[in-house]
Amino acid sequence: MTSNPYQSNPYQSSAPAAAPRLVTIAFWLYLVTALIHIISIIVSATQLPQAKQAAQDAIDRTGGSTNGIDVDAVVQASFVASIVVGVLFIIAFVVFDLLMRRGANWARIVLLIITILGLTGVVGGVVAILGVLASIVAAVLTFLPASNAWFRAVKERKLAAKQR
């Protein structure tokens, strides 16, 4: 009979076992991804003057009319909205990462979905590619057999604790 260090035992405390090394590495890789998103937001914020000028140049080139709309205000509002959404995304991402590290299987799945959706960011340059690669490696690590066993054991402990 082989012993599983993550297998639930009804006589043990309900405190979950420490996350395996692979999950801890994935946790840190997801934090690196969040840091890369923060850097990306900061870099984007420095591009506001160029974005305003590009919008004005496009209007001038096409001979289009703004019908009294303040192009600078529209560009600035778009930047502010994208920064707010980006910050909210990073906060949610870090919360999911923390929950995944504590054994929440659903958080692991949410992070996988975010990683898959993040594959569209590969066209964003070297920084975006690094973030996507870190997320991909982290996602793979959380689904390896040792990680799966740990997530399963955490779930079993929670179910056993509820039945007491």
Image: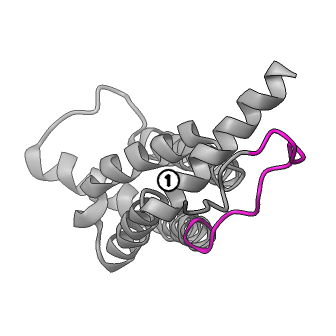
Q: What residue type is labelled 1?
A: Asn
Compared across the picture, whether 77 is left or right of 12 comes to left
Q: Does 157 sit above or below residue 128? A: above
Q: Does 133 sit above or below residue 108? A: below
Q: Quadrant of residue 157?
A: top right
Q: Mark 1 points at which residue?
A: 148
Q: How crowded is mark 1: few (under 14 residues within 10 Å), some or many (20 or more)?
A: some
**Colour setting:** one colour
What secondary structure do most residues of the magenta stretch adopt?
loop
- Can residue 18 be seen in this snapshot? yes
Q: Which of these two is toward me, 18 or 156? A: 156
- Let me know if residue 20 is in the magenta part: yes
Quadrant of the image containing the N terminus? bottom right
- Can residue 84 be seen in this snapshot? no
Give the magenta range: 9-23
Q: Does 158 sit above or below residue 3? A: above
Give the residue at x 55% y 63%. 2
User: Residue 92's x, y, as percent?
Assistant: 62, 44
Q: Which residue lies furthest to the left in this view?
A: 62
Q: Which of these two is toward me, 149 or 33? A: 149
